[in-house]
Amino acid sequence: MSARDRVRWDDIYREREGQPFPAPDPLLFQYTPIPEPGQDWRALDLAGGFGQNGLWLAAQGYVVDVMDISRVALLRGKAEMTRRNLRSLNFLQVDLDSATLETNHYDLICVFRYLKRDLFPQLREAVRPGGRVIYETFNLRYLNLVPQFNREFLLAPGELAGYFSGWNFLYNTEEQHISRLVAVKSS
């Protein structure tokens, strides 16, 4: 992302400052394995914004990296982490255009309402064998609701599942204008 994108996202999150802190995405509740005590499971909340999903994962026992371009969003997430007395989160300001994810580093990666196609190979490699990806974003049907939306950031039918071919799908749907996938990496 360019500096212009960072400023734009900072402005978007600044406009939301007076709103209640967002709830985690419900897809996490159903498909997130909960670590047993003593397990060191790592999660990544990619393009996490305020980090509401990462905060929920930390409360479940994960060590979480929340990555986003917006410093404004990350600072609000960090303040919420302190308010909730959580300690196992890292809020990382990252330009995802140049990000490098560690191989076999995460037990779970979640991505909500973000699409950067050239990150998919890194996402696949960053998940440990037996780990999972929980992914949800808009597809081309979103143009029926917002015709001027940039098609570059919309999935074609079947596209999301194609990025994780060879993985075990726990959930895969393209209902209405949103594509959702939960997939487990083969051991």
Image: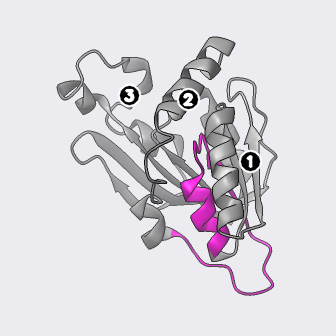
166, 125: nearer the viewer = 125
Q: Is residue 97 above or below residue 174?
A: above
x, y percent for residue 92: 76, 42
Q: For marks 1 and 3, give the one nearer the viewer.
A: 1
Asked whether, in this view, residue 34 is left or right of residue 12, the answer is right
- Which mark is on residue 91? 1
74, 137: nearer the viewer = 74
Which residue is situated farthest in the left direction here? 144
* N-terminal label among 1 and 2: 1
**Snapshot colouring:** one colour
x, y percent for residue 132: 59, 61
- Which mark is on residue 154? 3
* N-terminal label among 3 and 2: 2
Say which element carries label 2. Answer: loop
Determine the residue positioned at 61% across, 39% down. Answer: 73
Asked whether, in this view, residue 61 is left or right of residue 147, the answer is right
x, y percent for residue 88: 77, 65
Q: Is residue 127 magenta?
A: no
Q: Which residue is mark 2?
A: 116
Task: Report the magenta residues as a range.
Answer: 32-59
Q: Where is the C terminus found, in terms of image quarters?
A: bottom right
Asked whether, in this view, residue 148 is left or right of residue 130, the answer is left
Q: Quadrant of residue 25?
A: bottom left
Spatial separation of the CA atoms under disc 1 and disc 2: 20 Å
Q: Is residue 156 above or below residue 30?
A: above
Spatial separation of the CA atoms under disc 1 and disc 3: 27 Å
* N-terminal label among 1 and 3: 1
> Around disc 2, counting alpha carbons within 10 Å, would you say few (fewer than 14), some (14 to 19), or many (20 or more)?
few
Tag count in the figure? 3
Q: For marks 1 and 2, give the one nearer the viewer.
A: 1
